[in-house]
Amino acid sequence: MTVAFTRRDALNEPLDLAGIGIGPSNLSLACLLESVPEVRSRFFERRGAFDWHPGMMMPGVELQSSFLKDLVTPVLPTSRWSFVSYLVAHKRLYAFLNANYDAVPRQEFARYLAWVANGVDGLRYATEIHDVEHRDDRFVLRFDNGQEEAKNLVIGTGSSPFVPDWAKSFLGADCFHNSEAKSRLKDLRAARIVVVGGGQSGGEVVEALLGTPDAMKQLIWISRRHNFEPINDTPFSNQVFSPEYVQAYLKLSGEQKQAALKNSILTSDGLSISTIHSIYRRLYALRYLDQSTLTASLSPNRDVIQMERDGNAYRLIVRNHFDGGIEVLHADAVVLATGYRFRLPDALGSLSERISLDRNGYPTLNDDYTMQWTGPRTNRLFAQNAGRYSHGIADSQLSLMAWRSAKIVNTLLGRQHFDAEPDNAQLVWATEAASAMRHQLRAGYSDGLLSS
Ligand SMILES: Cc1cc2nc3c(=O)[nH]c(=O)nc-3n(C[C@H](O)[C@H](O)[C@H](O)COP(=O)(O)OP(=O)(O)OC[C@H]3O[C@@H](n4cnc5c(N)ncnc54)[C@H](O)[C@@H]3O)c2cc1C
Ligand SMILES: NC(=O)c1ccc[n+]([C@@H]2O[C@H](COP(=O)([O-])OP(=O)(O)OC[C@H]3O[C@@H](n4cnc5c(N)ncnc54)[C@H](OP(=O)(O)O)[C@@H]3O)[C@@H](O)[C@H]2O)c1
């Protein structure tokens, strides 16, 4: 999409906000900013067009969250950029409803996102930001053939594939992170394949491999967790994906946050039940119905600690935390479904020295998603999807992106343009909230409001 040349450009006035990266996070922010014309913004994406995790768009993959938690609906349900608007615009609302999906196909949600990304103003593609400098009262963003200046900056560059140190020197056609799975798997002709990582990405890779076993004779799937753990997708657990929870979580100490995060990890990072069923049933069919020669084994409690070349193949050294044993595995190909981590984009260059990092290597975030940095307070640096530790497990998911965008807009404007106040929590997380609630209840009784 081309961005119109405006009077602002002629006057060399900086934008109010520039965004680096156009994934769902910054796309949500761009949608909400449509309702605030006084904020002049522009977002930059290195890809030629919007594309949501293309390397993992295998057949049959599903969304892990509700389609109502789209780019806008939780804070601006009247926006023209809701998922329901997409369905109506594409004349498939009734068809979609009749499909009665338990989980929306990820392909459909990706098409929705791409439709929005093609329609919202101020988005510029094929523009990788190489460098950001802070000069005088503004940020200067540099890209091939140009630069842009902005008073405030929002980083929406997502998280990067995590490759363990032991695998780094082997990356290529037969050892790769799952983020490249779609293109790599179709050419893979390996007889012995090891998939490392028991999260949803590992599950989707295993499901894809079992769908077209072709040359595969042996498949080993390794999980470091105690088992191939399902996502905890039940109502009380899902309360961690709410503004109320974030509000309570923000008040915790660093230690308390780590403990709360550990306790809620499977609300986000477990395997979808549908993926578990699909893999289990496929294994059953291969073994008992098809009399397949494929041997497939699932190995939980395993930590891969080393990888070596073994002729044209690989040898993996694995520690079994269940009984303390050490195993040696042989593989012709290794898929690393070892997760993702947030990191500041290289583009921040010299600026990154001025940004405070927490003990996890993530930027130290204030409650309003601004990073702590040594620059002027009038030049804010926001970070999206960087608050897993500071703001809780939901920050690395889609669930609260619209709400987070609303908070960012409110901070930029210095007023509550969007109602981002949490609901009354049913689950009472914080001590003071519990006391206040009991106080209210007592007051209610004494006023006769709750007497039967
Ligand atoms: C396969 C997969 C499926 C997922 N499914 C779900 C789900 O169903 N539900 C859920 O809640 N969460 C899901 N998540 C988690 C998360 O919500 C998504 O990863 C989401 O895409 C995060 O959005 P984002 O905008 O923060 O980052 P990203 O989607 O990663 O987007 C970042 C963008 O920044 C661009 N970029 C990076 N550097 C630069 C630069 N220097 N200049 C310009 N552009 C740059 C990148 O090209 C990219 O397009 C999933 C994650 C994965 C990996
Ligand atoms: N369909 C979807 O909606 C979909 C699809 C894919 C991903 N996602 C989401 O994206 C996020 C990331 O998922 P993910 O599966 O990519 O990552 P993940 O949930 O972080 O899983 C990665 C796994 O790899 C393990 N691991 C790392 N190093 C290892 C080693 N050396 N040996 C053995 N195991 C090792 C980790 O173990 P530890 O647990 O011990 O660290 C972890 O369990 C999740 O929130 C997920 O829900 C969603």
Image (cartoon, rainbow, N blue to C red):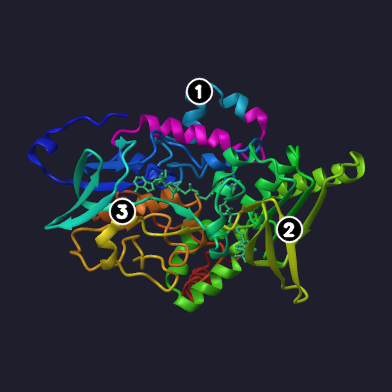
Image quadrant containing the N terminus:
top left
Q: Amino acid at mark 1?
A: His
Q: Which mark is first along the chain, 2 or 3?
A: 2
Left-right relation of 136 to 202: left
What is the crowding at mark 1: few (fewer than 14 residues within 10 Å), some, or many (at least 20)? few
Residue 315 in percent (x, y) is at 69, 61
Left-right relation of 22 to 268: left
Q: Which mark is first along the chain, 2 or 1?
A: 1
State which mark lies toward you, 1 or 2. Answer: 2
What is the crowding at mark 2: few (fewer than 14 residues within 10 Å), some, or many (at least 20)? many
Residue appearing at x 50%, y 76% in the figure: 256
How far separated are the C-alphas under marks 1 and 3? 37 Å
What is the crowding at mark 3: few (fewer than 14 residues within 10 Å), some, or many (at least 20)? some
| Residue 330, numbered label | 2
How many marks do you count on the picture?
A: 3
Q: Is mark 3 within 8 Å of ligand 1?
A: yes
Q: Amino acid at mark 2?
A: His
| Residue on which the image places disc 1 | 90
Q: Are marks 1 and 3 in contact (CB under 8 Å)?
A: no
How far separated are the C-alphas under marks 3 and 2? 39 Å
Residue 133 in percent (x, y) is at 20, 56
- Which residue occupies the foreground of this view, 91 or 143? 143
Residue 360 in percent (x, y) is at 45, 70
Kind of element beneath mark 1: loop
Kind of element beneath mark 3: helix
> What kind of secondary structure does the magenta stretch mostly adopt?
helix
| Residue 347, numbered label | 3
**Magenta region includes residue 107:** yes
Kind of element beneath mark 2: strand
State which mark lies toward you, 3 or 2. Answer: 2
195 up-or-down from 127: above or below = below
